[in-house]
Amino acid sequence: MLTEKELKEYCAGARENYLAHISIDCVVFGFHEGLMKVLLLEVKDEGEWYLPGGFLLKKEPIEMAANRILKERTGLDEIFLQQFHVFGDPDRSKQHFDMYKDMIAPEENWFTNRFLTIGYYALVDFCETNPAPDQFAAKCSWRDLNDLPELKLDHALILKTALDTLRLQLNYQPIGYNLMPKEFTMPELQKLYETILDKKLDRRNFQRRMLGFSILTRSDQPRKGGAHKAPYLYSFDLENYKAALTEGFKGGW
Amino acid sequence: MLTEKELKEYCAGARENYLAHISIDCVVFGFHEGLMKVLLLEVKDEGEWYLPGGFLLKKEPIEMAANRILKERTGLDEIFLQQFHVFGDPDRSKQHFDMYKDMIAPEENWFTNRFLTIGYYALVDFCETNPAPDQFAAKCSWRDLNDLPELKLDHALILKTALDTLRLQLNYQPIGYNLMPKEFTMPELQKLYETILDKKLDRRNFQRRMLGFSILTRSDQPRKGGAHKAPYLYSFDLENYKAALTEGFKGGW
């Protein structure tokens, strides 16, 4: 909760710098060795959680804004965020409308605006990131998808929509280039899919289908040491991988 | 081109009624018997073409606005529009910024606002629709995708992005329920896919893959008359069709 002085300064600055009625929210999924998490912030003194988000500068491209906001709120930089949906329910910010009504006149209060929020999502290796909260948040942390706290506003809907989009995307676009080591086994890749989908997949079907997409190269050398039948190693064929990102998988129509 | 009086009235009304900085543009693809078209409007006296679009009322849900705008501009009603992308380049409306600058002060001019536009698309049977232009347009008509006029602002990009999205969607979601007759042959359905993708598909692969999705029911009776080997007739299994719309095809992961 801001003091009256802080609020008035914030609102004056926001009206000066930001485009009215537009916000951006980022859903950053983290994967590491069979675990899937999402990045959330906890409001200072309020115990409420929310997605990293913010506003668009008056002349700023939206992709740039999404990355700036994520960096400001969490410290994370150079994450490839993908736009997935605009949430525009007229009552989506109701919780905000009344929040400061005794401290500031409605026409000066940035938060009484109706905001459409543009959702962005990303999937990163959560062990390679080091999130840090901004000045308004008490905490910025990776939370288990299966054990989420209550989220503010419509952030639960935004998170669910991002997850549905990610899962659907697995059917027509490749994933995993920034999550797998340079070389990996088929079971390791399968684990990534199983974690995102939250279900077991058939080993033989997975392998057959994945090889059919022509985005993997098999190494001549199996993995050394350990197992007495060494597994094949694969890496992504980047040219085909990138083509599939824009055109969908080969073996589509 | 509006007169000064018309412009001032329009801008005053727009500021009163619409949410600033947001617009909506609709890409309506029309299919009929192997032909694919897109719905465009021609500006009066200017010979320029654009997508049906407009603004969001201050308290209006965005899906409702998209349908209202499409109806106002083209007369088309009850079309299922799907949101696909927000276009937010800061310079995307440059053409508009200067258009009326000698007729009205910038702070009163609605069109000097920066607008982010939310793109919606739909695919309909163009023979079952009867488009009619609004008061600002000279014409509202179906234009061939292969013979498009020059489009205003970034509308060529919006149209291309919609088409790419539709083509990608064919890989993971069903299509055609509102485009095919109740019963249809496999070659008739294949023709729909070929028209959208603008390429020939292999007959046997198409049939095998389409049947694998479990969204079709084969009729016991082949089509009567005409051909001396009567083709099988199919219809959509609506329950599976709808499930595939939200979850992607069976036979996905």
Image (cartoon, coloured by chain):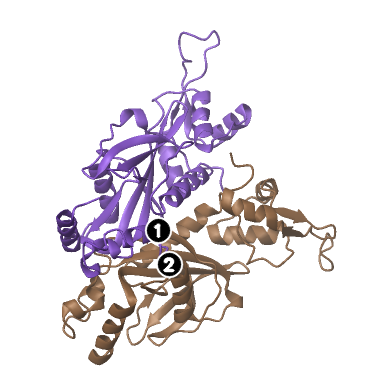
Chain colours: A brown, B purple
Q: Which residue corresponds to mark 1?
A: B86
Q: Which residue is more in the foreground, A133 or B199?
A: B199
User: Which residue type does callout 2 highlight?
Assistant: Ile
In space, the residues marked 2 and 1 are separated at their CA atoms by 9 Å
Question: Do the residues under discs 2 and 1 have CB atoms within 8 angstroms?
Answer: yes
The image shows residue B212 at horizontal and vertical percentages of 56, 35
**Label 1: chain letter:** B
**Label 2: chain letter:** A
User: Which residue type does callout 1 highlight?
Assistant: Val
Q: How many marks?
A: 2
Q: Secondary structure at mark 1?
A: strand
The image shows residue A106 at horizontal and vertical percentages of 17, 77
The image shows residue A17 at horizontal and vertical percentages of 33, 78
Disc sitting over residue A62 in the figure: 2
Task: Name which residue lies at 42% across and 75% down.
Answer: A52
Task: Name which residue lies at 49% across and 84% down.
Answer: A132
Task: Name which residue lies at 55% across and 32% down.
Answer: B211
Residue closest to the far front: B102
Residue A90 appears in the rendering: no
Q: Which residue is more in the foreground, A119 or A55?
A: A55
